[in-house]
Amino acid sequence: MIEPSHAPAEIQACLSDIQDTLGIPWTPENWRAYAMYPSVMQLFWERLKPATQTESFLEDAIAITERIYRDTSDWYQPGYQIDIDEAQRHQIQRVLNAFTFGNPQLLIQQFALSRTLASEVVGQEGNAAARRGPNAYQRTEIKLIGEQSVREMSPQMQQVYRDIKQTLGVPIVNSDYQALARWSPLFLAAWQDIKLWRERPEYQLLKQDIVQRAENAASRLRPVVAIGEPEVRDRLDNPEDFERIQQTVEMFKDILPELIVQDALLYMGLANLPSVTKL
């Protein structure tokens, strides 16, 4: 993955534009992965940006979030208890709010990319109303604990990072968990709880529902998104990179529904924790 601070100026500008447009305070891993192929990433964003800038796109993303919280409140009971002070609770809630706001937007984009790389034209002709103003989450960058930094924390934290990758079947620890790792007692307890709950049918059914909603939202994008395999291949020096890009698109299409559900469970678990006052 590209480290934004080390990327060429034009890539930094594109990644910054993605954050500003989506209103999110972190550089998403999927776009950092596409930045390994700069001209392809710029093509992806050039085609997706017009549809992403619309109010209808944002409404579809928010509807996914609302559905998750309605559903999980019916069946999720956190299985851990730790003490947490109000200042920490507020900080963690803000972080989770940002991911809850951003990840559904990223998921809809992933479905659009997946289908366009299969030579489909996604969405509907015509334009839609522009998004109304900036979002509060974009102002302060979320602090993340990367896999290099976690080695300096504790063997236990390193093991949880490895466990997250193995359990979710991905080669990275996403930003959601890299952000939560700053509060290690909650991070460690919540991850063990989520591992148990993700085996439950309620969890899996909700994940399937999110996938269907995101796919439907991609079909409603305005204006249409069209890229196609030949156009992507033309921008690659190595033809084999097209398959790697496809695999990356599919990986994030698979992992984002998991993260969306898990962020909701984390938020509900946090809301149920007793508060303590720091002396």
Image (cartoon, helix red, strand yellow):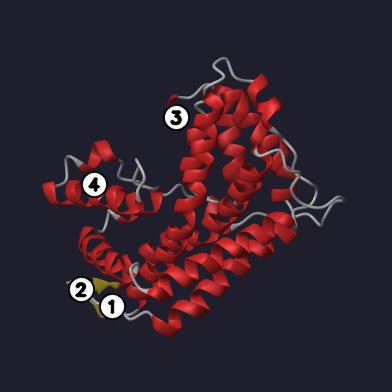
Spot the residue most to the left: 155
- Closer to the eye: label 3 or 2: 3
Q: Quadrant of the N terminus?
A: top left
Marks 2/4: CA–CA distance: 23 Å
Badge 4 local density, few (<14 within 10 Å), some, or many (20+)?
A: some
Assess whether mark 2 and mark 1 are in contact (beta carbons under 8 angstroms).
Answer: yes
Q: What residue did someone put label 2 on?
A: 82
> Which residue matches tag 4?
162
Secondary element at tag 3:
loop
- Badge 3 is on which residue? 2
Give the mark, 2 or 4, whose residue is nearer the N terminus.
2
Q: Secondary structure at mark 4?
A: helix
Where's residue 136, x and y in %?
Answer: 57, 58
The three-letter code of the residue at mark 1 reads Leu
Q: Quadrant of residue 204?
A: bottom left
Q: Position of residue 275 (x, y in %)?
A: 26, 78
Local SS, label 1: loop
- Residue 15's mark? none
Q: Which badge, 1 or 4, comes first in the chain's sequence? A: 4
Give percent across and percent down for residue 32. 49, 35
Q: Pick whichever, 34 or 250, lies toward us.
A: 250
Label 2 neighbourhood size at 10 Å, few (<14), some (14-19), many (20+)?
Answer: some
Q: Is residue 98 left or right of residue 170?
A: right
Q: Which mark is nearer the camera, 2 or 4?
A: 4
User: The residue under label 3 is which amino acid type?
Assistant: Ile
Q: Which residue is mark 1?
A: 273
State the image quarter where residue 85 is shown: bottom left
Q: What is the distance, in whole Å, between disc 3 and disc 2 at their CAs?
A: 36 Å
Q: Give the CA distance from mark 1 to mark 2.
A: 7 Å
Verify CB contact (< 8 Å) between mark 1 and mark 4: no
Earlier residue among tags 1 and 2: 2
